[in-house]
Amino acid sequence: MEQKINTFLQDIKSVVDAEVNKALHHDETLTDGLYKAAEYSAAGGKRVRAVFTILVGRLFGVKEDILYKTATAVEMIHAASLIMDDLPYMDDSQLRRGKPANHVVFGQDVALCASIAMLSHALELVLNDEALDTAQRNHAARVLTRAFGFDGLAAGQFVDLKLKTKNVDYAIIEFINAKKTAALFTAAGEAAAAIGGAGEKELNAIVRYSENIGFAFQIIDDLLDASGSKTVVGKDTAHDKMNFVMLVGKDKAYEEAQKHTDEALRALEIFGDKNTELKALSAFLLKRVH
Amino acid sequence: MEQKINTFLQDIKSVVDAEVNKALHHDETLTDGLYKAAEYSAAGGKRVRAVFTILVGRLFGVKEDILYKTATAVEMIHAASLIMDDLPYMDDSQLRRGKPANHVVFGQDVALCASIAMLSHALELVLNDEALDTAQRNHAARVLTRAFGFDGLAAGQFVDLKLKTKNVDYAIIEFINAKKTAALFTAAGEAAAAIGGAGEKELNAIVRYSENIGFAFQIIDDLLDASGSKTVVGKDTAHDKMNFVMLVGKDKAYEEAQKHTDEALRALEIFGDKNTELKALSAFLLKRVH
């Protein structure tokens, strides 16, 4: 099954890379540099969130290609948020995914314009998606929009920034992880489940699953950061922002990631045997650190 | 009729101010400062775009309260864009609407988070708007989303930034005005007309009207800037960005604003006698300068 997830990640990565390319294709002369800056950041990444989106959809019998645009939108929102995270007055990162951060290459002004344009483009992809009916488009757009606002990325980044020099406790780091990371997983999961016609009980289960996967994913990311190897994570952050690993140590942090993964798996129980792929994905994501 | 428009502006301003207040009402402790920063910028303004939205709706028989959320969303997107425009690496403005710019008060990091959160919140307002059916929500969200992306604000700001030190001609300034200013008027007009059940011919007429009003509005803004009186415009920009007035002089610029207003009025002709309020609004906006 691990092999299958690996293959699936490769396949979906190819599809999403092509979709991003198509979405940013244009024949504008004046704004060519804006598209180039967006492409620079949208082109990278393992596409974990896209795979996540599509596998949740499959649980509900949604054919993969129905979710290509939604999955691409999730990745574009993620890419846009990374551009903003890296800005000097945010996390001040020079490197991202092993190459210079967007603002290092294009300047802060262009980086911000590209980021905003990508947020817009991601939502347009969903709001215009011919594979979906109007109610599905709106549901997906609604949860993806929420994921970067007052209950999502902006909130997480705000608390992260404001509290980085203060005493930070478990609850605050949990809030930051919930908003900065889990919110987009949750939106992706809810969008896919809604497109799959999930009822309220099923939607709630997917939200619980997605939140916990998001939490586990962030802790594993922090563990990878803590391993200190830039080559592993391709990130270089000037500020030592407090995170879960720094707060409780590596072993306890890994236990916490394991706990969230278990909680995610429990949420899947109502789906019986159909949950195999999502279970495999959870195990795969947890294993990244080892 | 001018008096009526004045009264209408006052009335709608009260309504939209209250809606913004309601939209940003919350009981979050950790993110209170994020909401405060958003409120700081969302609270101001003449609400011209909200009035514009509602008057276009009235042309199609839409009752005002049906458009309150859409009009509020338009104003929140506008406010979010102003926060970003004022950032040091953008237009580097210290003052906005007669008070310190958002980033001067809250810092660049919080200003950006607040701006992103407001974009999200604006779209959520529309996508959750119980006054609208699913198709109406979709259409409104779609055009408002487009207004800040690769065909809207981000594109306009990008070209504005990249070309400010180069030779600028009429076509480029027209592009900037189209994207930075007219795009949001056009989205507001199209959203309102679509909510009013406008057919294709009517939608096209409203788009033409809105674009031209947007152009005229921007030129008048530039004329007010050129009058050099900060107290009039409440703005203080470090960079002398090229604009229409600087390119062709005040008289020719005013003629151009007049020309766009005339073109806007011609677009309204298909509506016969029903167009009185929109005609009056056009005249009112042109008159700001005198």
Image (cartoon, coloured by chain):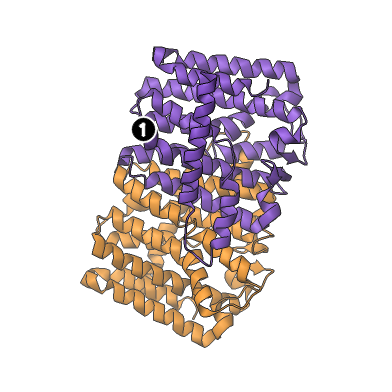
Chain colours: A orange, B purple
**Where does the N terminus of chain A fall, quadrant-wise?**
bottom left
Q: How many marks?
A: 1
Furthest toward the bottom, the residue is A251
Rendering coords of residue A274 (x, y %): 23, 68
Quarter holding residue A164: bottom right
Q: Residue at x 44, y 43 (%)?
A: A124
Rendering coords of residue B250 (x, y %): 74, 20
Q: Residue at x 62, y 29 (%)?
A: B177
Chain containing the residue with disc 1: B
Q: Residue at x 34, y 65 (%)?
A: A207
Which residue position holds label 1? Answer: B195
Q: Callout 1 environment at 10 Å: few (<14), some (14 to 19), or many (20+)? A: many
Q: Nearer the viewer, residue B151 or B79?
A: B79
Q: Residue at x 33, y 41 (%)?
A: B131
Q: Nearer the viewer, residue A101 or A27?
A: A101
Q: Is residue B188 left or right of residue A139?
A: right
Residue A167 vertical position relative to residue B195 in the rendered view, above or below: below
Rendering coords of residue B88 (x, y %): 72, 49
Q: Is residue B83 left or right of residue B64?
A: right
Residue B12 vertical position relative to residue B82 in the rendered view, above or below: above
Q: Is residue B56 left or right of residue A238?
A: left
Quarter holding residue B34: bottom right
> Can residue B190 be seen from the camera position used here?
yes
> Can residue A15 be seen from the camera position used here?
no
Residue B257 vertical position relative to residue A135 in the rendered view, above or below: above
Q: Is residue B240 left or right of residue A153?
A: right
Q: Secondary structure at mark 1?
A: helix
Q: Nearer the viewer, residue A230 or B93?
A: B93
Rendering coords of residue A243 (x, y %): 57, 76
Kind of residue at disc 1: Ile
